[in-house]
Image: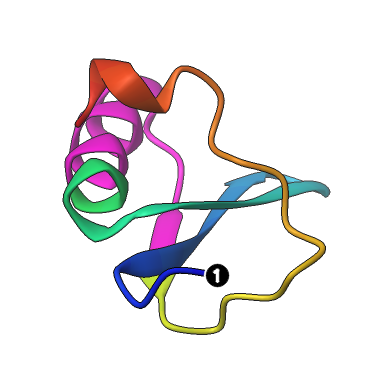
Amino acid sequence: MSDDQCHVRIEFGPLVFDYCAPKQAAIQYAHDIGEWLGVPVLVDDEVRDDLPPLPCESLWA
């Protein structure tokens, strides 16, 4: 896993989705999607090898 990867967590009530993404994409995604959907999007350094990549991460890169 690259050093610039972050853990991204999206919480839709009881549904929780975890992804990994480059730091720049993760931060922009958290801002845009969190604001648009009004849901918590958390970004931290807790990256694990089993995390799938953020869907469509190139839109936020």
Q: Is residue 22 above or below residue 35?
A: below
Quarter of the image with the N terminus in it: bottom right
The residue under the point 82% across, 63% down is: 50
Q: Nearer the viewer, residue 48 or 28?
A: 48
Q: Nearer the viewer, residue 2 or 11?
A: 2
- Residue 13: image x %, image y %? 72, 45
Magenta residues (range): 28-42
Label 1 packing within 10 angstroms: few (<14), some (14-19), many (20+): few
The residue under the point 69% across, 75% down is: 48
- Residue 36: image x %, image y %? 29, 20
Residue under pointer 1: 1
Q: Residue furthest front?
A: 2
The residue under the point 35% across, 77% down is: 3
Residue 26: say if magenta.
Answer: no
- Residue 51: image x %, image y %? 73, 57
Q: Is residue 30 above or below residue 38?
A: below
Magenta part, dominant SS: helix
